[in-house]
Every structure is written in C-alpha cells, then in structure tokens.
C-alpha cells in the first residue's frame, strides 16, 4: 500500500474519533487490522501516542515519519510518541522506543478512576483499552461485593471494582512486577491494602488454596492469556475454557457473577458461545449477557474495510466478554 493511501485511512479514522478526546484519556485512534493498514495500531494515552507495528516486515520509515508529522500537527496536547515493534529482535523496541518527547505519562483517568501506567513495561501498554466497558460495568455494580480478579495483570479490572465500592478485591497474577502496577493504582484511588489485596502466584495453586479454605466471592473475573504453561497447569483459550471455568466456579457465591474473557483471535464467537451454552445446561449456571468492546477499538462502520480472521459474532470483537450467573447447590431449598 502506498504511504499516502495509508495516511489517508489513518486521518479518516482519527477524524471519526474526534469526539472522544474530550471524554477519554485512553482510546484507540486507529486499528489498521480493520481500518485498512494491517498490522498498524495507534493508541492515545493522555499526552502520548503509541504506534504499534505488528507487521512482519516493519512499517516503512516514510510512513512512520508521516504519521509523526501529522500527529504532532493535528492532535491536541500531544507531547510524546512511543514506537513499539512486536517482531523486533530488540526488547527495547518491543517495549517501546521514544521517538518524540522526553517522557511518557505515568497515569490516566477513566470514568473518574485513576490508573497507573508504564507504557514501556511490556509489549502492550500496561492498560487494556478493549475492556473499558467491563471496567464501567464493574464500577457501576460492585458496591458491597467481594471480587476476585484472576490473571489480573496490572489490575485495572480489580481497581475499577474497588473504586465502585467493592467490600474487598483480591487481585492475583503470576507476575509480581505487573501486580506492582495494581498497587500503585490502588494508592492513587485511596484503596487500602486491606480492601484491595494483591496476591502473586500461579492461578491453579492460588484458586486451589482458596477452594480448600472455602473462600467465596460475589464476582470472579477470569481473564487468562491466550496460552501459557506452568508447573501447576496449562492455559489454552482455544480448547480449555471449560476446564478453567470449572476451576474458579466453586469460588463464586450463590447468585454471584462469573465474568469470562476469551481473547483468542482464531476462536469464532459461535464456538465460544456454544461452549458456554453447554456449560449453562446446568441449572446452576446461566448466561446473562455479553459486554461489547468499544467502537474505537473495533473501528466504525464507515471506517472498517477488513474483517477479523474468524467471525467473532455474536461478540463484536475477538475479545469476547461474557457474564454468567452462578447458583450454588448448597443454597437451594
């Protein structure tokens, strides 16, 4: 694709998102996978723009320079540009090379909640834009709940629940370095360590201990990575969602919620729904609905020119978010 054509598509997508700048500090400015420049994604985080290059061959220097020039001229309050190339042999470039400005922001605010950022912590940006609507749901529903956030990463979902008035939030992840970000976010929102507990450890061992201790939560969040293997177990979102669900389901209190996220790109939405429907044949588990990914992440009808590799329907994006309600046998009359 010619550089000029790619830039035109980026500008068209950015114009469509102009209304977001007044209400959001973190949003997707351009999703090239769907909006016509495959492999190129632009995200805005407060005063920073992140250019994600997922292509095999690398974005051309001419296009990269054109994006920087246009952005600095047209995007309000832009102070820094970070470039991340997923397939770079350099971890520094994978995690982010600052190509404009002196520093990147260390926090953003969304729906009145402040989240710590480390835009160079990992290959992503330490904060997932695609789960914005889930954070809003947690913020609006968590009052008085006990919440378990598994595979918490930097803890934004648990922080949203805590800010929404949850009685207690437990955030667990294998990587303590990621959980340090959750601790920072809790402090920023005056959430005490007693209210928001951080627990580093393997998912299978942590939930096993909780089951042994008969811990119960009003809401449990299951947001695993696409694939991982540890000494205690394996995560595979293409084939083992049911097994993971059954590990965490005993920790959900009567009439509690189980939030399930599956971001497997090559898992059709119908297959995921069929798996959930099979589980919900049990009288103790019900599918209550789904939470869509924001349109700035998916692209808008007038800007989308490409389709995902497999159809995510009835979900609107490969990040598939389902809400299940749990009944307990020991609470039935």
Image: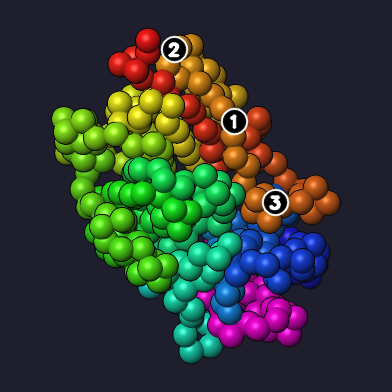
Tag nearer the camera, 3 or 2: 2
Residue in front for this viewpoint, 278 or 74: 278
Residue in front for this viewpoint, 239 or 306: 239
> Taking 299 as reference, is 219 above or below it?
above
> Taking 83 as reference, is 27 above or below it?
above
Quadrant placement of the C terminus? top left
**Of callouts 1 and 3, which one flags the residue occurring earlier in the amino acid sequence?**
1
Tag nearer the camera, 1 or 3: 1
Residue 319 rendering spot, x and y as whole percentages: 55, 42
- Find out whether the residues at labels 2 and 1 contact each other: C-beta distance under 8 Å: no
Say which quarter of the image contains residue 30: bottom right
Gap in Å between the C-alphas at discs 2 and 1?
17 Å
Q: Residue furthest right?
A: 302
Question: In the rendered image, is residue 93 in sight?
Answer: no
Q: Residue furthest front?
A: 333
- Circle 2 is placed at which residue position? 282
Secondary structure at badge 2 equals: loop
Q: Residue at x 16, y 30 (%)?
A: 212
> Taking 83 as reference, is 138 above or below it?
above
- Circle 1 is placed at which residue position? 289
Q: Which residues are magenta?
A: 55-84
**Of callouts 2 and 1, which one flags the residue occurring earlier in the amino acid sequence?**
2
- In the rendered view, does 211 fall on the left or right side of 52? left
- Find out whether the residues at labels 1 and 3 contact each other: C-beta distance under 8 Å: no
């Amino acid at each position: 694709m010619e550089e000029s054509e790619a830039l035109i598509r980026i500008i068209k997508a950015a114009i469509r998102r102009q209304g977001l700048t007044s209400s959001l500090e973190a949003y997707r400015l351009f999703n090239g996978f769907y909006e016509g420049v495959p492999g190129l994604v632009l995200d805005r985080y407060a005063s920073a723009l992140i250019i994600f290059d997922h292509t095999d061959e690398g974005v051309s220097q001419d296009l990269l320079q054109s994006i920087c020039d246009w952005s600095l001229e047209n995007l309000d309050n832009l102070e820094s540009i970070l470039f991340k190339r997923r397939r770079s042999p350099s971890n520094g470039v994978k995690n982010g090379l600052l190509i404009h400005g002196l520093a990147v922001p260390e926090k953003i605010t969304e729906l009145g909640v402040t989240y710590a950022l480390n835009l160079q912590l990992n290959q992503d940006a330490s904060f997932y834009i695609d789960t914005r609507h889930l954070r809003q749901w947690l913020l609006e529903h968590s009052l008085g709940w006990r919440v378990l956030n598994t595979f918490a990463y930097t803890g934004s979902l648990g922080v949203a629940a805590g800010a929404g008035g949850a009685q207690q939030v437990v955030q667990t992840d294998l990587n303590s370095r990621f959980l340090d970000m959750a601790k920072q976010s809790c402090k920023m929102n005056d959430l005490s360590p007693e209210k928001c507990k951080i627990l580093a450890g393997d998912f299978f061992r942590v939930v096993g201990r909780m089951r042994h201790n008969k811990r119960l939560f009003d809401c449990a969040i299951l947001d695993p990575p696409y694939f991982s293997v540890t000494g205690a177990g394996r995560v595979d979102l293409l084939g083992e969602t049911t097994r993971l669900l059954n590990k965490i389901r005993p920790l959900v209190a009567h009439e509690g919620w189980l939030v399930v996220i599956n971001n497997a790109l090559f898992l059709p939405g119908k297959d995921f729904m069929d798996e959930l429907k099979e589980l919900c044949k049990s009288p103790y588990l019900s599918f209550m609905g789904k939470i869509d990914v924001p349109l700035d992440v998916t692209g808008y009808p007038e800007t989308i020119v490409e389709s995902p590799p497999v159809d995510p329907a009835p979900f609107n994006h490969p990040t598939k978010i389902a809400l299940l309600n749990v009944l307990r046998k020991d609470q039935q009359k």
